[in-house]
Image (spheres, rainbow, N blue to C red):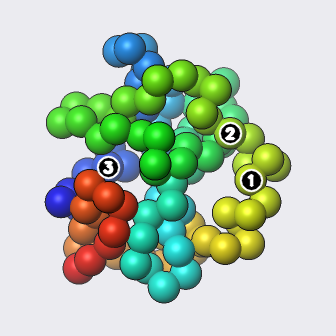
Amino acid sequence: MRRAEELLNLPVCVRGIELGRPVDLIVDRELTRTIGFDVLCGDEAHRFLPFAVARVRAESIEIDSPFVLLDFDQVAFYREQASSLRSLNGDRETLLVDEDGSLSR
């Protein structure tokens, strides 16, 4: 388990090349599961990274391809079914994220 704040301090990388940084967690409305990350990419665009395709390592969040970073316009389902941790005023310091994406305090 890792604190949400720790995850937001890791770079998102493909084969060691940094593509961006997570700026928020996308979570279900009940704060029980992490759905993905809001990633600020090098081109200043915010993109959605599904938690299921990310591998959280000690020093980075690894993905296999930049194509898994989706424009938020493409992921309307997540906007309807989930919220950003920031918008829910979730405490990133005390919220813990398990390897499977489940959340606890």
- Nearer to us of marks 3 and 2 is 2
- Residue at position x 61%, y 46% from top? 48
Q: Which mark is residue 75?
A: 1
Q: Residues within 10 Å of mark 2 (few under 14, many from 20)?
A: some
**Does residue 6 sit above or below 18 in this rendering?**
below
Identify the residue at image location x=56%, y=67%.
84
> In this picture, is 56 found above or below 89?
above
Q: Amino acid at mark 2?
A: Leu
Callouts 2 and 1 close, C-beta under 8 Å = yes
Report the side of 86 relative to 62 (left or right).
right
> What amino acid is labelled 3 in the image?
Leu
Q: Earlier in the sequence, mark 3 or mark 2?
A: 3
Residue 100 image position (x, y, % from top left)? 32, 58
Instruction: Specify the amino acid type for callout 1.
Output: Val
Labelled disc at residue 85: none
Element on which disc 1 rests: loop
Between 19 and 33, the one nearer to me in the picture: 33
**Which comes before the other along the chain, label 1 or label 3?**
3
List the residue tagged with mark 2: 70
Whichever of labels 2 and 1 marks the residue nearer the N terminus, that label is 2
Q: Please tell me which residue is depicted at 25% across the width and 68% down the height of the picture.
A: 96
Mark 1: few/some/many CA within 10 Å (<14, 14-19, 20+): few
Q: Quadrant of residue 70?
A: top right
How far is mark 2 from mark 1, CA to CA? 7 Å
Residue identified by numbered label 3: 7
Return the x and y of residue 102 as percentages of the image width and height.
33, 69
